Amino acid sequence: MNRGAVAEIHLFALAHNLDVIRNITGNRRVISVVKADAYGHGSIEVSKKLVKEETSFLAVAYSGEAVQLRNSGISAPVIVLFDSWAFDDFFDYDLIPVLHDVSAASALSEFAEKRGSSISVHVKIDTGMGRLGLLGEHAVVEIMKISSMKGIHLTGLMSHFSDADLSDRSYAMLQLERFRGIRDEAVRKLNRNLFSHIANSSAILTFEDAYLDAVRPGIMLYGYSPLDKSNQQYPDNIKLLPAMRVKTSVLAVRNIPAAYPVSYARTFHTKRQSRIGLLPVGYADGFNRLFSNNADVLVRGKRAPVVGRVCMDLTMVDLTEIAEAREGDEVILLGEQGGESITAQELADRAKTIPYEILTSLGKYSRRIYFDVPSC
């Protein structure tokens, strides 16, 4: 048998979530973020679906991700967010690099001149995230330098919020104010518009002023809100559809006596005679070791707790309360079954992380299959 889990990717959910985003933002242009293999959903199939649904741009982290999309036949505009030195790829594959400093821009200009060509670029402004981008009072001067370089056509400006998911939006408002100030001064000096974007999924849900010329959803496309439900800004009327369902099957069922240890270090002992199911997934398959004694799976529409430590290749669950469970039964690690559901947010809470990590981990290690119509 094959090891690990199967991830069902529901492409129709992507289309639904994209429509939700458009409805919220008044049909702003959408830059769909498909980095990290589309958050574990598979960047090629996901991008093809989003392009079919007329997303304006795709965005990836590094040029290698963009090259994969181009080699699969995707011709839509692709923005490369972090990798500003992959000059050959930018020209050979018609990509839009995001420049973070003048030195990279200067080197790109020289490269463009040697090729006798030109390239459209966006420039990133660091408004308070502290990662990449032009900083503070020198930003406008550096934008002007970049815009004057041969072979470079400056078409866009972008920035990134540090914490637009918080109920207290004061820092996000400060970042937006900084970004707008720099943009407005640059536009005035250049005497032309610059395509501007800063709104991630959190800002789409909470911060209408940040929509600008386009929005950049990531996690929302895949069916999850980045906001904690305790957030005062949490929009209860927004209905996103999770695009990933992860399943495996019961490998074996064992009858174990009371007071018997299960798995490494004996962190779990049965309290009664128990039926313990073994699943052919472990931490090597993206099922986090922090789920040891700390997560549920679904079997026949009922919750079965993980017992003992998650192993590299196996996970044990308690099936005692599911008397009808048998070897070969479908097991849901993430998703719905029989009216019950386990969400990426639930698993993230258990592991004290965020849904992004759950999706990228399970999606990366599972065998993916794709559906483009809802199941009955």
Image (tube, rainbow, N blue to C red):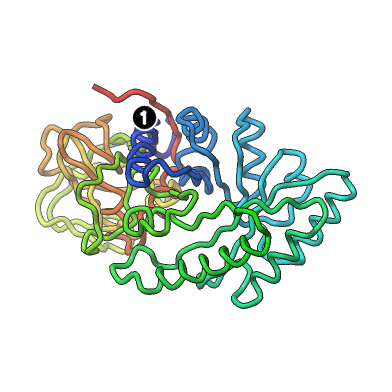
Q: Secondary structure at mark 1?
A: helix
User: Which sits in the foreground, 114 or 326?
Assistant: 114
Q: Is residue 69 above or below residue 199?
A: above
Residue 334 spot, x, y in % from top left: 30, 43
* Corner quadrant of residue 248: top left
Residue 294 spot, x, y in % from top left: 25, 58
* Corner quadrant of residue 15: top left
User: Which sits in the foreground, 261 or 335?
Assistant: 335
For image coordinates 54% across by 55% down, the residue present is 196
Which quadrant would the N terminus be assigned to in this image? top left
Q: Is residue 14 above or below residue 293?
A: above
For image coordinates 44% across by 44% down, the residue present is 28
Question: Is residue 177 something that shows in the picture?
Answer: yes
User: Which sits in the foreground, 334 or 286?
Assistant: 334
Residue indicated by mark 1: 12
For image coordinates 11% across by 49% down, the residue present is 273
**Label 1 amino acid?**
Phe
User: Which sits in the foreground, 254 or 135?
Assistant: 135
Q: Which residue ends up furthest to the right in the rendered image?
A: 114
Tell how many labels: 1
User: On the rendered structure, is 242 left or right of 199?
Assistant: left
Q: Which residue ends up furthest to the bottom in the rendered image?
A: 137
* Corner quadrant of residue 210: bottom left
